[in-house]
Amino acid sequence: MSKPHVVIIGGGATGAALAHDLSLRGVQVTVVERGEVTSGTTGRHHGLLHSGARYAVKDQESARECIQENMILRKIAPGSFELNNGLFVAITDEDMAYRPAFLEGLETCGIPYKEITPQEALAREPNLNPAVKAAVEVPDGTMDAMRLPLRFLATAQSNGAVVKTYTEVEELLMQGKTVVGVRVRDHVTEKTYTIGADLVVNAGGAWSGKIAAMAGVHVPLQPSPGVLVAVYGRWNNMVLNRMHRSGDGDIIVPQRTLSVIGTSSWVVEDPDRLEMKKEHIQLMYEYGAVLVPAIKNAKMRAAWAAARPLIGSGGAHTGRELSRTFKCFDHAERDGVEGFVTIAGGKATTARGMAEVTANVVVRKLGLDAPCRTREVVLLPHTAYYRRRW
Amino acid sequence: MVSETYQRPEPRQPSRRFGDWFRLRGRSAGGWAFVLHRLTGLVLVFYLFLHFYFLSYLARGPEAYAVMVAGMKSLWITVLEVGLIAAVLFHGLNGLRLMLMSLNIGVEQHEAMFWGTVVLSALLTAVAAVLML
Amino acid sequence: MATVTFKIYRYKPGEIDPPRYDTFQVEVEDHTTVLDVLEMLRLDDPTLTYRHSCHHGSCGTCGMLVNGKEVLACVTNVLALKTKTVVVEPLRNAPLVSDLVVDMTPFFEKYEPIGMPYVRASEYLPHSQPPEEVGSYMRFENCLECALCLSACPVVATDPDYLGPAALAAAARVVQEPRGQDVHGVLALVDNEKGCWRCHAAMECSAACPNDVNPGGMIMFLRETLLAGKHK
């Protein structure tokens, strides 16, 4: 009996993790991605391996997801993170007022933490603002935004998955109210062809809304971009966060020989037109300087924007109001469209968890009895992705 | 149930042409040194065969050789000889630069060493030209 | 704000074959990068293909030739080029897939066997005291696997068997900081006529490298190491 075939639309972190999960469960997987893998939102994110502490007060569901996935990723992708931990630091009296709720949130969400003195904090991070009043250490880390998903894709490929880049879905093939495949255009040759599927998963991230519309269904996806600024120099070795309600420019993530300050938040209609806000670049420098005063003179390497794929209906103003959690939509239940599932929302840190939930839905619909194994299987190195026939 | 039989064509292999060595577009100092070293090397190899050809006149007797040498005393030949000296100087001095680099000496300053080689070769060539012309 | 002419190399097997250059007049601002321009052009022409991901010179995917020089498009400011016309072409010495997209398989065929760990010790802020459970601070290696060095190298241009600057620099990093790897084995991989001895010291690799790997210097370090017999 041949393997069931699933087409995943979207070659970002979610599509990559899902391709890996389903391949392990004996499903034939084809990933179609209109550009280079991770060229959507995934490649451009802050690179933070979240401890979840940032969401410990206001978005506890997301915080719990983050810390669980953080621990799993360390196990399945060893050697892919800068594991220096992170600090949440209180600089102002307002920050200090946030501290009790923060600590309580960490407890509630099961995030390991250690309170350290301002002196200890400055010993760990000499460039930290000397006005630091309190500091809490958490298991934050740095991930390489592109290379971690490459590990998922590499492992999936080794288990038979096929990744087709520069392959853009133009139409979902329907038979009545059932999705039976996709019609794609290969941008290498500009030829179109069809790929039949037993089930199609929409893992399009910020583009999930547009893709869902191809099946005539609605997914409440609100693209919400933010600005990030990478400066030369590694001003801190640990991730530095401001101990306050999530706001703009309150995280500095070290990465390689750079420091990335971020981020801000607004909403757009079209994920292809992010309406980059140049004035936010100066804002990032100002906010960054609250954590690390010397960073205000750091030379800029790049400033960019990427659209968070937030789940929420209209009415969102900046995107900060929306949860960072994820949701799997089975369109048969919701919309009467069979053979089509959307996985949207989430964070790069939780991609594996998102894939587990989605794959459970997929195999149930396919009538397979195959449990998830992605918590245990150690991923191939990212370089293995390129062991492929073009 | 993959129904497509579409196959994407293979990528186009990069062209590997002899002339690629001598590309100057987009090159920096070290690349110019590479190109010049190769050019002067080719000149020297070509000259080596030429030199054997001239020396072969000796086999035809001292008279024939003397006539050939006398015929070499034109301005054009002397200009070429100055060019040859320039090639020998650059190739030799840059060769020393390359030897030092291979011993991991002065690698950080390799661009300065290249300019030094060029300047020294030019100076000594000028001296030779003055002496010969 | 200024208007700059862009000439973009186009190739699609069987479709744009032989290759041609498409010309565009583009309005750019102070912050605009070459990648920003490609993204703008793609909105009107979805057939334009190029690699990109992180947009800040960390993933190494957007390597291409701009006015004949190897750069990462995402950190190449257009106005800083100071030319009225900007010519954008795919990297040299790599198989061409379409437009500006090259096949990275040959790069990784040479690079992967070296087995350089992706994480190294962080030399930044050496007097700081890391948390006990962290031990010592770590960071990602400099090499972005962008293949700008292979594009610039005149030996890679003509010898398909040459290991190339990226793989050799990775080998040098393993020798400098083994992290449990087999230094002997790695040196054996490079100590031959297609390894570190094939280099002609053009140093174009180091000139092209966007992240201070200095592959040329690393190759000379390997030569010194092998000549000194330090790891016999």
Image (cartoon, helix red, strand yellow):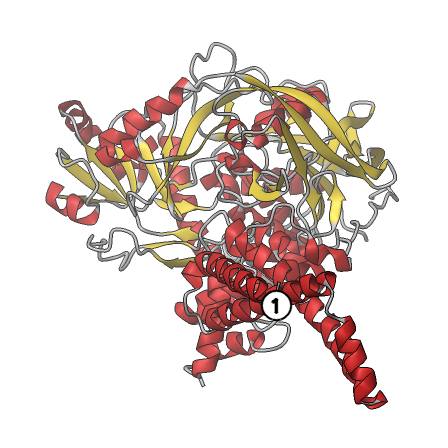
Residue C179 lies in quadrant: bottom left
Residue drawn at x 56%, y 71% is: B92
Residue drawn at x 68%, y 61% is: B79
Is residue A283 rendered to the left or right of residue A191?
Answer: left
Residue A188 lies in quadrant: top right
Residue A271 lies in quadrant: top right
Is residue B61 rendered to the left or right of residue A278?
Answer: right
Q: Residue furthest top?
A: A315
The percent coordinates of residue C174 (x first, y second) are 45, 68
The percent coordinates of residue A65 (x first, y second) are 42, 38
| Chain containing the residue with disc 1 | B
Is A69 located above or below residue C41 in the figure? below
Is residue B115 rendered to the left or right of residue A264?
Answer: right
Q: Amino acid at mark 1?
A: Ile
Image mark count? 1
Q: Is residue C46 something that shows in the picture?
A: no
The percent coordinates of residue B54 (x first, y second) are 78, 79
